[in-house]
Amino acid sequence: MYPSPTPPREVRIGDAAAFAGTTPRAVRHYHQIGLLPEPARGGDGRRRYGYADMVRLLWIRKMSETGIGLDDMRAAFDEARDVEDVLGRLEETLAAQEAEIKRRRAAVRRLRAVGSPLGLLSPLVTDRLGHLPPGALRPSDLDALLITERIFGPLGAAIQAGVFITLATHPGLRAEADRLDAADAALDDTVDPLDPRVEELAAQHFAHHEALLLAMEAAGLDEAEEELFEIHDAGAGGEEDTVMSAGQAVATMPYGFSAARTRCMELTARLLAGAPSADPSADPSADS
């Protein structure tokens, strides 16, 4: 049997939503925000949608596909805002979306070219480390760069990258860094913060830091850092992914260090704060 050719006078919300290509939930939301007047309910207590309601739903669907926001739709229906104003706002939104798409495509190309998670960091960081051979950077190195970039931005991470370049090119310094990392990990909650080993380890960290500085100076990495500032100031350093101050970021990044390890870090910081400039007569090449 063929259905009757006579269209219904009114339909329920499910049929209205299906015809307009949307969902009942979306239709209810349109009612809540005043975009679609809520129709009267029938004898069964359910809403009934007529011809005018369906037309409005179709216009909402068309404007949504164009990218017009719900607030602008309401203004357009109420004729409270010039259509040119609505279209101008839409153009700005589309331009921002296009810029974001270009940024994401560039990030994908960079990630594919680098072939490691390093490509997910900012171009300023990736470009500085891209010359290193595969495997030169350890996962912990990338983790550290990721955190630094979040707290201090691409420039801070790019400067820190000089340390990892040095470690990758000086096996002796890398071995000492690994030894110090293992010693740090051994400072668990069973170690008394006043244990003499804590102060001794802080002194070793200080000595290793000084050796790193000498190696970086010998390789000209300090001069490269000056170029980083120029690149960043010129706007080529990528966008800052910062929604909080550096102090807030540091305070909210959990590390779970023991009291002994925390004291070791504090002692190391004190030594570094009072350290004189590195002795240029030292020979960092002995570590390579």
Image (cartoon, grey):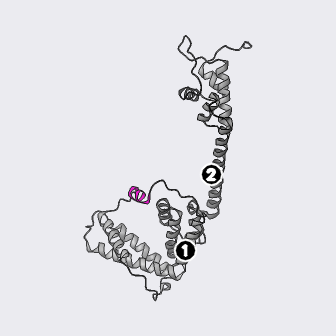
Compared to residue 134, the image places residue 4 above or below, namely above
Magenta span of residues: 245-252
What residue do we see at 50% from left, 56% from top? 242
182 relative position to 29: left or right: left
Q: Mark 2 or 1, which is nearer the eye? A: 1
Amino acid under disc 1: Glu
Q: Secondary structure at mark 2?
A: helix
> Vertically, is 89 above or below 102?
above
Q: Which residue is mark 1?
A: 226
Residue located at (66% from left, 31% from top): 61
> In terms of image quadrants, where is residue 79?
top right
Q: In the rendered image, which residue does mark 2 sit on? A: 100
Secondary structure, mark 1, is helix
Pick whichever, 75 or 1, lies toward us: 75
Quarter where residue 33 is shown: top right
Across and down, in percent, residue 239 comes to: 57, 58
Q: Circle 2: is it few (<14), some (14-19), or many (20+) Cα within 10 Å? A: few
Rendered view: 25 above or below 191? above
Determine whether, in the image, residue 237 is placed left or right of residue 279.
Answer: right
**Of the residues shown, which amino acid type is indicated by label 2?**
Glu
Residue 199 on image: x %, y %? 30, 74
For this rendering, which residue is in front, 219 or 77? 77
